[in-house]
């Protein structure tokens, strides 16, 4: 398995190479010259289809927060020689209350909340949080930052107005230091127990909302978020803006989506999905029942059996009690199937920089050594990116695919044949 940060270090970006040079040795070593060598080849067809389009993973981020600028002074001869840069004084803004959810936009299209005290009790969910860490040092830094946090909330409004608000004990500076190191300057609310990050216009807007009583005329996302925050430790509410990529799968008709996790006492999930029509809601309900049967027949595990769905017009309300979808084997079986692919498409719709195309882990595990290029394409579809070395004999390619909710997987082909299965 590889992650975007690891690809940034190990991958060779075609974007950095500029246009292909198909003169001399370049004709043999640059895959983008394939159409000059044989315009009727399968490799030329893939180049035209965009398989080898540049993808600079060094700039890829799960979410573009719009936080330009630096916290340190520009480098001087002294700093380049090793002298430490001097951080600016922390920004502190007084806050007379602790109704932190006032910072939410009145009409956001994504809002999420996390109770880290409860999350640390769930090994499965913490595994998801650490899934993108590329080494033990990074994991320890993230763990140290998260241990300082009690809660984290995110509010995202169009076009790129993003604010994160965190509460906890930030006196040691681990969490704040991670932001400072990235050139992001937190704003502390009253003291070292609450801080916000965002672009300066987003911060000023959030501070203005915090200074006023909670608005009563807010939109569906904010109202639903406040409802879920009362008795769910972790939750996400989404209403993608018009034109956001939703894919073309079974859950494409969903226009509003809310999902909440209860992690204390009896584990449970519940929420609702509002489709564009009653017919769309009926099709979604039927698809969920089909997925229950398909997963049970394939794995012998009733991964979705605990999921109950009720329809009222164009609204679907769903719930699962007990371990069910929250943790363990059932959760893994469901997320490894096409159900996980569809759910990812709904949850991540509208997040800039997040790969829209995903492939279920079940399908990736079906790829075996010896399979031909056409067989892999038929099973998995177009990869996110292709790194090719054409100077070898036979030519070598590494295809990268995205698994829902975090992991990236590579497949190696030599001479158009799989030699290293997904890993």
Image (cartoon, helix red, strand yellow):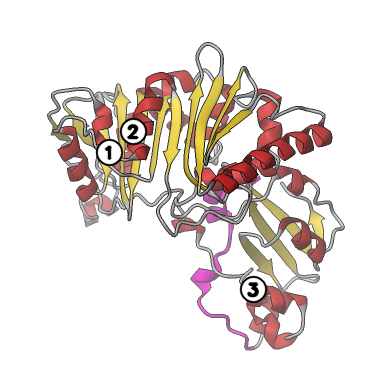
Q: How crowded is the residue under tag 3: few (<14 C-alpha within 10 Å), some, or many (20+)? A: few
Q: Nearer the viewer, residue 272 or 380?
A: 272
Mark closer to the chain start, 1 or 3: 3
Q: Give percent across and percent down for residue 388.
A: 67, 67
- Magenta-tinted stretch: 1-23
| Residue 139 lies within the magenta run | no
Residue that appears at 62% across and 85% down: 22
Q: Residue at x 44, y 22 (%)?
A: 232
Observer-side mark, 1 or 3, equals 1
Q: Quadrant of the N terminus?
A: top right
Would you say the residues marked 1 and 2 are in contact, meaning their CB atoms lie under 8 Å apart? yes
Q: Helix, strand or loop at disc 1?
A: loop
Q: Is residue 13 above or below residue 211?
A: below
What number is the disc on residue 218?
1
Which element carries disc 3, helix, strand or loop? Answer: loop
Is the C-beta separation of discs 1 and 3 under 8 Å?
A: no
Q: Is residue 178 visible?
A: no
Q: Which residue is mark 2?
A: 223
């Amino acid at each position: 398995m590889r992650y975007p940060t690891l690809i940034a270090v190990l991958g060779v970006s075609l974007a950095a190479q500029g246009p292909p040079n198909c003169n001399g040795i370049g004709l043999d070593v640059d895959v983008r010259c394939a159409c000059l060598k044989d315009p009727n080849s399968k490799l030329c067809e893939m180049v035209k289809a965009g398989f080898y389009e540049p993808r600079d993973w060094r700039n890829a981020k799960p979410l573009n927060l719009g936080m330009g600028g630096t916290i340190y002074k520009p480098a001087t001869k002294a700093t380049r020689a090793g002298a430490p840069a001097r951080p600016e004084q922390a920004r502190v803004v007084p806050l007379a209350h602790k109704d932190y959810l006032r910072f939410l936009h009145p009409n956001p299209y994504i809002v999420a909340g996390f109770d880290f005290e409860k999350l640390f009790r769930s090994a499965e969910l913490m595994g998801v949080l650490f899934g993108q860490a590329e080494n033990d040092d990074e994991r320890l830094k993230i763990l140290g930052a998260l241990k300082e946090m009690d809660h984290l909330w995110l509010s995202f409004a169009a076009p790129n107005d993003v604010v994160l608000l965190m509460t906890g004990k930030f006196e040691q500076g681990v969490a704040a230091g991670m932001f400072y190191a990235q050139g992001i300057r937190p704003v502390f609310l009253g003291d070292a127990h609450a801080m916000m990050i965002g672009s300066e216009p987003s911060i000023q807007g959030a501070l203005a909302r915090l200074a006023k009583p909670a608005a009563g005329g807010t939109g569906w996302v904010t109202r639903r978020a406040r409802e879920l925050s009362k008795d769910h430790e972790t939750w996400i509410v989404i209403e993608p803006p018009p034109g956001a990529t939703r894919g073309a799968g079974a859950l494409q008709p969903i226009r509003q989506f809310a999902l909440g996790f209860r992690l204390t006492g009896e584990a449970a999930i519940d929420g609702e999905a509002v489709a564009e029509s009653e017919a769309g809601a009926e099709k979604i309900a039927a698809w969920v029942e089909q997925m229950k049967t398909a997963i049970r027949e394939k794995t012998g595990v009733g991964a979705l059996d605990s999921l109950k769905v009720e329809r009222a017009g164009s609204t679907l309300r769903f719930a699962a009690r007990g371990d069910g979808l929250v943790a363990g084997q059932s959760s893994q079986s469901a997320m490894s199937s096409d159900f996980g692919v569809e759910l990812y498409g709904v949850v991540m719709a509208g997040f800039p920089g997040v790969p829209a195309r995903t492939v279920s882990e079940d399908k990736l595990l079906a790829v075996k050594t010896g399979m031909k290029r056409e067989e892999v394409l038929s099973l998995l579809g177009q990869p996110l990116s292709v790194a090719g070395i054409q100077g070898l004999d036979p030519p070598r390619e590494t295809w990268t695919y995205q698994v829902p909710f975090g992991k990236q997987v590579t497949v190696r082909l030599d001479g158009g044949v799989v030699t290293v299965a997904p890993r």
